[in-house]
Amino acid sequence: MATAAQSPSVAVAQAQSTRTLRSRTQGWIYLILIIVGILSLIPFVWMFLTSVKTYSDVIALKFWPWPPIGTSQPAWGNFAEAMARIGTDRDTGLPLFVRHLLNTTFITVAVVVGVTLTSVLAAYAFAQLRFPGKGLIFIIVLITLMIPDEVTLVPRAVMMNKNYLGWYNTYLALTMPFLVSAFGIFLLRQFFMQIPRDLWDAARIDGAGHLRYLTTVMVPLARPAILTVALFNFIWTWNEYRWAQLVTSSESMRTVSVGLQGFLQAEGGTETQLAMAVAVMVVLPILVLYFFTQRYFTEGISTTGLKG
Amino acid sequence: MTVSTVPKELPKAASSRRSKKSTPKYTLKEAILAYGLLSPAVLLMLVFTFFPIAFGLYISLYDWRLGPRAFLGLGNYARAFAPRSEFWPALATTATYSLLSVPIQISLALVLAYLLFQKIQGKSAFRVIMFLPYITSTVASAAVWARLYSPDTGIINQVLSLLSLPEPRWLLENKGVFTLIANGLGFKMPLGITGPSLALISVIIYTTWVFVGYNMTIFLAGLGNIPGELYEAARIDGASGFQLFRNITWPLLSPTTFFIVLITVIGTFKAFNHIWVMTQGNNGTGTAAILIYKQFYQFNREGYASALGFLLSTVILIVTIIQNRVAANRVNY
C-alpha cells in the first residue's frame, strides 16, 4: 500500500479512510460480540467453578481459590456429597439423584420416540394420502398448535387423579400427554410436501407400498427435520419442571428438575457449592448432547422458524 | 397454508386408479391406511387437549377442591373479576413483564444478529455460545442467577462494590425502580409512582439472557433470506449503511420480526418456571401463571385455577389477534 500512499489523488485517500473506518467498525463489532459471549458464559463458568469449591471458599467469596492464585484443591467430593445429602431411593437402594436421572432419561426417551413416531406417521398421511375428513383433522392439529398449556394444565392434572385415569405419581402421567406434538406434525408435513411426487411414482413402479416408501425414501430424506423435532423435544422434556412437580408425590418418581428445586429449597439453599454440583449434573447431559448436535438446532430454526 | 381439497363423498369405483393430481379420488385402502397412521396422534390430541378443555370448563363452574363441592355457575369467574381480586395485579404484573422484556429481548437480538451477519470470524462459535442459555434447564440456570443476584454474596454486587456503586437487593427488592432511583438521588417520586419492582427487572434481565440467542438465531435466518443483490444495487446507488438497514433490511425482515414478537409475547404471558425458582412470585413478580399454579398447587382450588387458566388464555388470544391486526398493514410478505 506504500505506492498508493505516494499518489496524491483524493480518491485513494478516501478509499484508505473508508478502509480504516471499516476495520475500526469491525473492531467494535468483535468487542461487542466478545462481551456478549462472555456474559452468556459467565453463569455457566460460575456454576462449574462453584461446584468444586469448598464451603469455606464459597463463603469467603473467592472466585478462583485454586493455584496459582489460591492454595485450595478442587473439591471433587462435592458431587458425591450432594448425592448423599439428597438421599437414597427406597425402591432400588440407588442414590435418589441417580433414580431421578434414570426417571428423566426414561421419560425423555419415551416422549422423543413417541413424538417422532406419531408426527412422522400423521405427517405422512397429511402430505401423501387422500382420505375423507382430511381438512377437518388438519384443523384439529392447527387448533392444538394454538392452545396455550395454561388452559389444559389444571384439568389434565385433575384427570390424573384416582377418580379419573388414576395415573397420579406414575410414568404414564409423565409421558402419555406428551407423546404427540402438533408442532412436530405440522413441521414434518411441510417437509414431506416438498419431496417431489415423482419419487413416489418411481417407488410404486418398483412395487413399493406406502409403508416401504415412507421408511426407505421419505424418512431418510426428511432426516434433518425429524432430528430437529426429536432434539427440541428432548431438551424441552429433560428441562420440564411444572408438570412433573404437579403429578408426582413420591421421591422415587421425581425428575431431575423437580429434585433440583427440592434440594435448592432444602440444603442447597445454604450450601451453594452442593446446589451447584447438582445443577452441573442436571445440565451436563444436555450440554454434551448440544455440542454434538448443535447444527440441527440452528438449522432447524433456520428452515422452520420454531416456536419456543 | 395449503390444505388439499376434500371430496364430498367416497367414489363408488374404488378400484379406479388415481393418477393425476387434479382428480382428488381416493381408494378405500388408502383412506384406511391414512386413518391408521393418524389415529395415534389424533386420539392423543382428543384425550389430552380437547377433552381437558371441556373438562376444565366444567371444573371451572364448581367449587372444586379434590372433587366437586358445590356448583357455582360463573362464581369463579366473578371472583377473578371482583375489584379487589388477586387476578388484576397478577395480570398487571404479566403485562408489565411482557411490555418491558419483549422490546429489550428483541432489539438486542436484532442488533446482535445484524452484527453477526457481517463478515465475521468465528461466527458459528458466537452463535453456539449465545444459544446455550436457551437449551439449559430453567431450574438450574435460574438457581445460578438467583445466587449471582444475592445481595451479600452475589458476584454482581461484588463487582458493583469494587466500582463503589450502590449494591441493590435485586430479587429481594420489593420497591419499584423509580422509587429506588429517586431515593438514591435524594428526592421522592410524586403521585406515588413506584415503577416495576427491582425484583421484576432482575427477572427480565435473566429472561433476556435466556432468549436473546434464540431470537438472534431466528433473525439470522431471516437476514439470510434477503437477496444479496438488493444490497449491491443500493450500494451502487450510494446508499449508506443506515439507509440499507432502513430501506432494505427492516422492511424485508418484517415477517421474521413479526413472528418473533408474536412468540415472545405469548412466551412472556406464560412465564412461570424461572420466576417460580427465583422469587416464588414474591416482590412484585407474581404473574398470572404463578397465580394459577399457587391456587392449584398450594390451595387446591381447582375450580378457581381452571377459571383463571381460561381467562389467561383468553387474554393471550386477544393480544395475539390485536397483534395480527396491527401487523396486517405493516408486515411485507
Image (spheres, coloured by chain):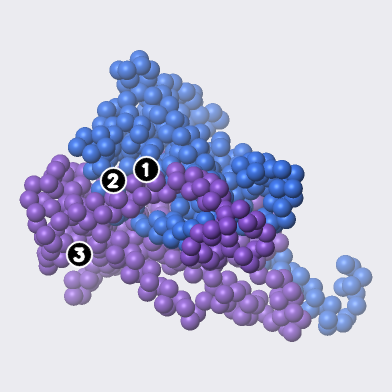
Chain colours: A blue, B purple
- Quadrant in the rendering for residue B81: bottom left
Q: Is residue A227 visible?
A: yes
Identify the mark at residue A132; answer none if there is no mark: none
Residue found 38% across the figure and 68% down from its top? B320
- A49 horizontally vs B67: left or right: right
Identify the mark at residue B88; answer none if there is no mark: 3
Distance CA(mark 1)–CA(mark 3): 31 Å
Q: Is residue B294 above or below residue B328?
A: above
Total of numbered circles in the picture?
Answer: 3
Q: Is residue A216 above or below residue A5?
A: above
Of residues A59 and B261, the one drawn nearer to the viewer in this rendering: B261
Of residues B329 and A264, the one drawn nearer to the viewer in this rendering: B329
Distance CA(mark 1)–CA(mark 2): 8 Å
Image quadrant holding the C terminus of chain B, namely bottom right
- Which SS class for mark 1? helix
Residue found 71% across the figure and 61% down from its top? B119
- Which SS class for mark 2? helix
- Quadrant in the rendering for residue B265: bottom left
From this viewpoint, which residue is outermost toward the top?
A: A93
Identify the mark at residue A177; answer none if there is no mark: 1
Asked if the residue under mark 2 is in contact with the one under mark 1, i.e. CB atoms within 8 Å, the reply is yes
Residue found 35% across the figure and 56% down from its top? A148
Q: Which residue is mark 2?
A: A156
- Give, as a three-letter code, the residue at label 3: Trp
Q: Chain of mark 1?
A: A
